[in-house]
Amino acid sequence: MTLFLNGSPLLVDTKHGQKALTAAHSAGTRVECGCRMPAPEMYIAATAGKFIVKRMPGTGPDHAIDCPSFLPPEELSGLAQVQSSAITEDPDNGTTTLKLGFPLRKNSKSRAAPETTGGKATEAKLAPRKLTITSVLHFLWHEADLAKWYPRMDGKRFWGVNHSALRRAAAGKIVKGQDLSRILYVPEYFKVDNKAEIAARRNRIFANLRPIGRGATPFGLVIAEFKGMDPTAHGARFTFKHAPDCSFFADADLAKKFEKVFGDQLRLIEAMGSGHAIVIASFSIAKAGYPVLHETGMMLVTDNWIPFEGLRDLDVLTALTEQSRAFQKQMRFNLPSDAPIASTVLLDTTDPVALFVADNPGDAGALARLTTASEENRYPSWCWFDEGPMAAFPGKGRPPSERDDQVREGDTTGQFVRPAPVNNRRASGGERDTSRNMSNSSTGTSDHV
């Protein structure tokens, strides 16, 4: 990806580039991405003491498929439902505000219920959309690019990488009027030799969650890999990987709900012998200093940390990975489990290809909705809808940066670009939709307790 500022190539991580971005940010100047023509505009944001360049809201599909800023259209996932309503980006100050459908504090005294007038409603309006706790996990995983996979990542993605990516993704995100990174705890990759330093950094986050006087008790958020839940005299003790010296506690009611909602997912991971169960939870700090859980969500991911929803979805991801394909996993966010979305979008074809997978080919209603979604999306589609083996994936194509269809005037970097394709045709291998006979148990990634 070649960036341009005022017509000149821009190297963001150099001293000269940071100086140029400082001036451009003050002047409100946009950066251009040279991945294609017309050049998509990008905005300048500050994070971790430096300036970075981010794609403008809703412009992911405007970038070339092999550009790091490319994102499939929001309507292929659950992002379209919450973007600009529960998720609001402000390019002027570089922040993103998240509207949450769950509390981040507990009042010391319960509030009185609002009075009812008994009169008729005078307005008809749509209730504002807010993110569930699992949707926040989906959003941060998406923002951290952890749902994107390239063959060169094989063997290079581990929890330390995830931790850094999630912390960067949380920067500049505002929840309930405060910086999310201030209250988000993501365990660091644990090393015994660094135990004291790791605990000190964790305690600085926990210190932000101690109530002041008799005011409301603030909540934090934790994102971690689930390790175990053991019964205690008053509920359960939760342990997370890479946090062996920090147990979280839950009352008996939450522990019971956790087992009811997520028991099948945890048993699936255990039966598979691979993959990871990622938990997100709100928590507070008890007077004695230990963390207490309040609301939890879960998402299952592969060994490569790619989210999956069901066994057929997992089978597609496994095949793509084994065939060294590049792809972007589509996330559900707030959408119910039966809402039709694409499973994945291929990133190594000449044009993007959306992959649609029927978790239960015997559900006629769900199949009809999924078929409509596959036919109406803007990209070619590959589908796996029946009980036979999956068809071959569309072949790899030459990426835009290696083609000479069109070159930016005045660009001496050799970065080639081309206009965006828009069509509704079926991709090769998708004319006869076939599937493999296997269990269709869903993992319920959007559930929470």
Image (cartoon, rainbow, N blue to C red):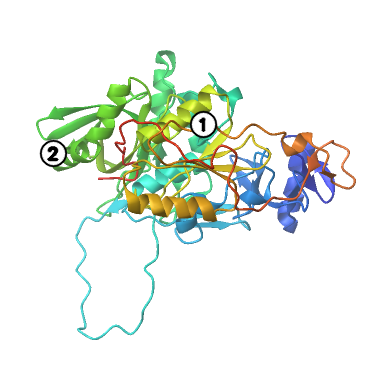
- Rendered residue at 36%/45% (across/down): 134
Instruction: Give the residue type at disc 2.
Output: Ala
Instruction: Give the residue type at disc 1.
Output: Ser
Element carrying mark 1: helix
Mark 2 neighbour density, 10 Å: few (under 14) some (14–19) many (20 or more): some
Label 1 to label 2: alpha-carbon separation:
33 Å
In x, y percent, where is residue 178? 44, 52
Q: Does residue 180 appear left or right of residue 121 in this picture?
A: right
- Rendered residue at 14%/35% (across/down): 235
- Rendered residue at 73%/41% (across/down): 18
Mark 1 neighbour density, 10 Å: few (under 14) some (14–19) many (20 or more): some
The residue tagged 2 is: 252
In x, y percent, where is residue 308? 40, 35
Q: Which mark is residue 276?
A: none
Q: Quadrant of residue 64?
A: top right
In x, y percent, where is residue 294? 25, 44
